[in-house]
Every structure is written in C-alpha cells, then in structure tokens.
Image (cartoon, rainbow, N blue to C red):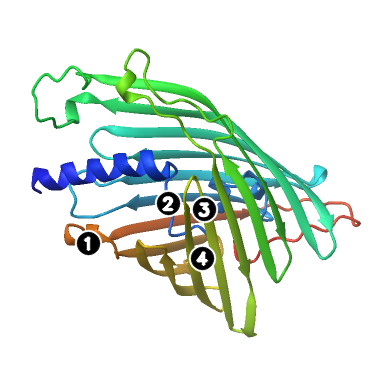
Amino acid sequence: MKNKYRLLLIALLLVGFKTFAQQDPQYSHYMFNGFVFNPALAGSKESLSALGLFRTQYVGVDGGPQTQTISAHMPLPSITSGVGIHIINDQIGAGNASLSFMASYAYKYQLANGTLSGGIGLGFIQRTLDGTKLITGVPGDPVVPTGKLNALKLDVNAGAFYNTELYYVGLSATHLTRPNMGFDGVAATEYRNVIHTNLVAGYNWNISPTLDVKPSVLLKYSKAVSFDVNAMAFINQRFWGGLSYRLNESLIGIVGLNITPAIKFSYAYDYTLNNLNVASSGSHEVILGYDVIIKKKIKTDVIIKTPRFL
C-alpha cells in the first residue's frame, strides 16, 4: 500500500478526533454487543454471557483500525442485580492505540410490564503512541516521539435500560471523567476524551412461530451526531440476517446462527460509502458468543424480563 494512503488515513483520523471527537470504537453488531457501552445491561440475560468480537476496518488501507473486544456478564438473581467486565483493545493506525478495562454493576427494578436497570462502570483507559511507526516528512522531527509513550487514566461509564418482551430502550454515557489522554511533557500529543452519549432502541415483531423481525437504531452523540439503523430477521431463533445503514459511512450486511443453544456466531460486512472507498474494500466484523444458563431459585414475587433480542 502506498504511503499516501497511510498518510491519508492518519489525517482523517486526526480530523475525526479534533472535529467529531468520536473516540469510541464503532460496532456493526451493536445489537449483540450493547453491554460494552451501557453498563445497565450487566446481567440482562438469565445466563453467564461471554462475547468475543474482532473488527478490521477499511481493509486495503495500510494501518487501518482494528478492534478486539472481550466481555462477560451475569445476573445476581438473589439481589436483582448483574455484574460484568469488558476489555477493549483499539488499534487506531500508525502506532496509536487504546486499551480499556471496565467492571460494571447494574440494579434491576420491575416497572410496569418490563424491567428498568441502572448501571455504572468503573475502570481505566490506557493510550499508547509508538513513535517508531509514525511517518514524517522531516527525519528527526522533535514533535514526533522516538519511542513508545503511555498514558493511563480513570474512566467511568453509566447507563439506564428498560425492556419488555416487545421492545427495549437504553441511554448511556461513556468517559464521564473526560480523561486527558495526552502524554506528560509532550504538548503536541494532548487530547481529552469527550463524553459519548448512546441511545439505543429496538422492537421485536413476531410475524409467525418461526419468524421474528427485529428493527433497531443506535443514535450516538459526541459533539456530532451519528446513527445506525438496522433490521434483522430471525428464523426459528437460530438463523439471522439483516441490513444496517450507518449515516454517511456504510451499508452493512449481517448473517449469523446459533451453532448450538449455547454458542452463537455472526459476521458483518461494511461496504464503505464515503471517499475512503477508493482505497478500502470495506470492513469486517465477527463475533463469537457463549451463554451458560444460571439456574438459581429466586423469590416468586420477583420477575426479571430479559431482552429476547440481546
């Protein structure tokens, strides 16, 4: 890949950070992976739920972003709560990377025909810049670090989630502490995480005993508005496929299946709609999930509804 494409990517990423401040990774499987941006989803299933996700973005562009996510959460029925953890490794090209760890707790309350959950996540975020991978026009530029730099800061997320058997809606915010991820003594590297607000909603439309259609939308705001809108069809709750549109960026196709009652696999392909399509052949994302049903006696007057979609 020609250097001009690498430089183009770096420039676009820097413009994105300064102008749009969209610093969190984006996910095409947001409908399965909502726990990583909303801690209120901790324990939202009646199982220990583990999920691994790998995303490679802008394939064909040298140094294109790559994201790996591992998450696990489970309910605590005896105290109508849930707990979980997640780790996100986000490689943002040209030696710029972030690693975050978050532990989350959610409390659940029966409200009307559904369950209202409130959650908080506490953890850290680490930013790494490897100066040896940066390409400059002037060798020995004093602004560019010659080795690896690291910054580690406290991070806090919070959210709320309400779901019934027919629909769900959630609101969350990440980086409430707005950590400054600049490196000590290097003014040119300074930048501060902004608060990212996420609003997600979905509906379960049961067309027949074997077919469910589940539209959803994810609205994101961090000094600029973006959204994903999706429609998925589920056959016998085992096979699924659907389409998404991400504002001014991608058209996304998703297919997947439950390999066993406990194991699910899903793949998403993002077709790039913006100017990067001249250099990129799109983006790929896969998830592998595993659910272990937790059997534990709970009080008969406590009803915890779980979102069928998630």
Query: The residue under label 1 is which amino acid type?
Result: Asn
Tell me the residue that label 2 is attached to: 26
- The answer to whether residue 230 of the structure is visible from this angle is yes
Badge 3 vs badge 4, beta-carbon distance below 8 Å: no
Bin the neighbour count of mark 2 within 10 Å (Cα to Cα): few under 14, some 14-19, many 20 and up.
few
Q: CA distance from mark 3 to mark 4?
A: 33 Å
**Which numbered disc, 2 or 4, marks the residue closer to the eye?**
2
Instruction: Say which residue label 1 marks.
Output: 277
Question: Left or right: where does residue 285 sit relative to residue 307?
Answer: left
Query: Is the C terminus in the top left, top right, bottom left or bottom right quadrant?
Result: bottom right
Q: Secondary structure at mark 2?
A: loop
* Amino acid of disc 2: Gln
Q: Quadrant of residue 63?
A: top left
Mark 2–mark 1 distance (CA, rounded to whole Å) = 18 Å
Q: Position of residue 135 (x, y in %)?
A: 14, 32
Amino acid type, label 3: Lys
Q: Mark number for residue 260?
A: 4
Q: Residue at x 68, y 68 (%)?
A: 167
Q: Secondary structure at mark 3?
A: strand
Nearest the eye: 195 or 86: 195
Residue that badge 3 annotates: 220
Residue drawn 62% across the image and 47% down it: 172
Residues under numbered marks 4 and 1 in contact, where contact means CB atoms less than 8 Å apart: no
Mark 2 or mark 4: name the one nearer the start of the chain: 2
**What residue type is disc 4 on?**
Thr
- Upstream in sequence: badge 3 or badge 4: 3
Q: Residue at x 39, y 23 (%)?
A: 182
Task: Tell which tag, 3 or 2, sits nearer the viewer.
Answer: 3
Q: Is residue 184 above or below residue 166?
A: above
Q: Earlier in the sequence, mark 3 or mark 2?
A: 2
Asked if residue 32 can be seen in this view, the reply is no
